Amino acid sequence: MRASLAVALLLVALMAGCGGSGHTLRDAQLSDVVLQPADLPGAFTQFDVGRQARLDRVAGPRYDATRYGRESGWKARYNRPGTAQTKGPLVVESRVDLFHDSKGAQTDLEAYRVQFQETPASRIVAVPKIGEGSVAAEQMRAGTPPVRFVTVAWRDGNVTASVAVNGFAAHTTLADAVALARKQEKRIADALGRG
């Protein structure tokens, strides 16, 4: 009897270790898993950072702040001066949304895809796998010169994250957004104990 109790307690301890903070992000970690100033070239200035607020919501299936068991969110936004000849993005937005569990995060990633499909003049583009699944979209805005907007979104554990960039179309690419998304994903993976 005593041996079976010891085995049961050991199993509970092992299960607790496997499902603990190594696989689930907590609210207190959100500010550390968005892009930080050191993740971007020195010309960028952080102009908006903190918890996502009502003004940060976008129309569509991800509008509701409590969707799919969402508990919280954080964002960091950066910009830099530039001209039509500046290579790379001029504006970068990094977001993370925390969900009660990975199922809610997976549903949110699917909602990103729907949001991209429903956004006028936006098209889904192929993107390398980031985290446990990813989706990306690109949008062009007419002008002289035209501006390209690229968003990469992914899921890892109980969070979804995204990096959105924009800059002059001739010098802003999906690769720019993917490179920054990989930096943010590294932060998330480290926080999840996978780094």
Image (cartoon, rainbow, N blue to C red):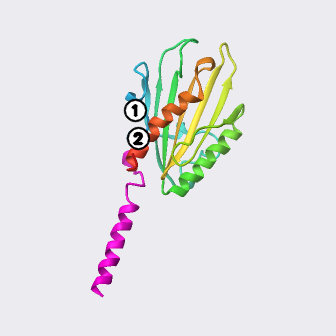
Front tag of 1 and 2: 2
**What element does badge 1 sit on?**
loop
Amino acid at dot 2: Arg
Q: Which residue is mark 2?
A: 187
- Residue 78 picture location, percent across and down: 46, 26
- Residue drawn 30% across and 88% down? 1
Residue 75 visible in the displayed image: no
Q: Which residue is mark 1?
A: 36
Report whether 71 appears left or right of 149: left
- Residue 45 picture location, percent across and down: 42, 22
Q: Nearer the viewer, residue 4 or 177?
A: 4
The quadrant of the rendering that contains the C terminus is top left
Q: Quadrant of residue 32?
A: top left
Q: Nearer the viewer, residue 70 or 148?
A: 148
Asked if labels 2 and 1 touch by Cβ distance under 8 angstroms, the answer is: yes
- Residue 121 picture location, percent across and down: 72, 31
